[in-house]
Image (tube, rainbow, N blue to C red):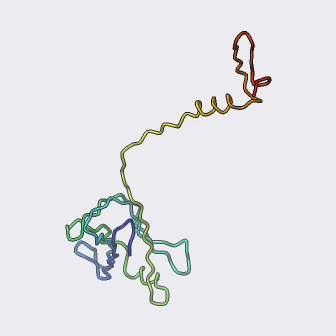
Amino acid sequence: FSCFGHQWTVKIYPGGKDRSEEGNVAVFLCNESPESIQACYKIILKHPTDQAQRIYLADQLKTFGAERSGKESWGNSNFANRETLLTYLNNGTLTIEIHLRANKQTEPTSFVPSNPICNNILKGFNNEEMSDVSFEVGGEVESAANRRK
């Protein structure tokens, strides 16, 4: 599957993997892309008839290395007992949910709001009904209310 511009695979080892205890299933999430990525991941199995019953690998932040780097996958060698896992099959299908959240660190940006005072003063100045500016020209006072047009 594809997520965050990366290709991913889920690898399930029903007989376990290198460090698995006898009778356990291993599950790993693997980055199949040429770039590494830092992400939080969670692997969840929901029971088909009892949605409250779940097996999951908790939310963890890891750096998934580039493919074939030797550090491209994270998971658990003892994810679940094989016999327990068999009760999670729904018509012979095991449904696994993968939750991914990218952990992109960006440079902090400062927010400077625009200052509308100049536009507001010009709007008020050009508004004949709101303007309180008066000019004295040749001894005669002019204001917006009695301005010559």
Residue 36, quarter of the rendered image: bottom left
In this figure, what is the number of numbered marks? 0
Q: Position of residue 104 (x, y in %)?
A: 37, 54
Q: Is residue 116 above or below residue 101?
A: above
Q: Identify the residue at the far right of this view.
A: 146
Q: Identify the residue at the far bottom of this view.
A: 91
Residue 137, quarter of the rendered image: top right
Q: Position of residue 144 (x, y in %)?
A: 75, 25
Q: Is residue 110 above or below residue 134?
A: below
Q: Is residue 131 above or below residue 21?
A: above
Relative to 94, 120 lies left or right: right
Q: Is residue 137 above or below residue 33?
A: above
Residue 81, quarter of the rendered image: bottom left
Relative to 63, 117 lies left or right: right
**Which quarter shows the N terminus?**
bottom left
Residue drawn 26% across and 67% down? Answer: 72
Residue drawn 58% across and 30% down? Answer: 118
**Which quarter shows the C terminus?**
top right
Q: Position of residue 84 (x, y in %)?
A: 42, 79
Relative to 92, 104 lies left or right: left
Relative to 51, 105 lies left or right: left
Frontmost residue, 19 versus 33: 33
Residue drawn 32% across and 77% down? Answer: 11
Frontmost residue, 10 versus 82: 10
Frontmost residue, 63 versus 35: 35
Q: Identify the residue at the far top of this view.
A: 139
Residue drawn 28% across and 68% down? Answer: 73
Q: Position of residue 121 (x, y in %)?
A: 63, 29
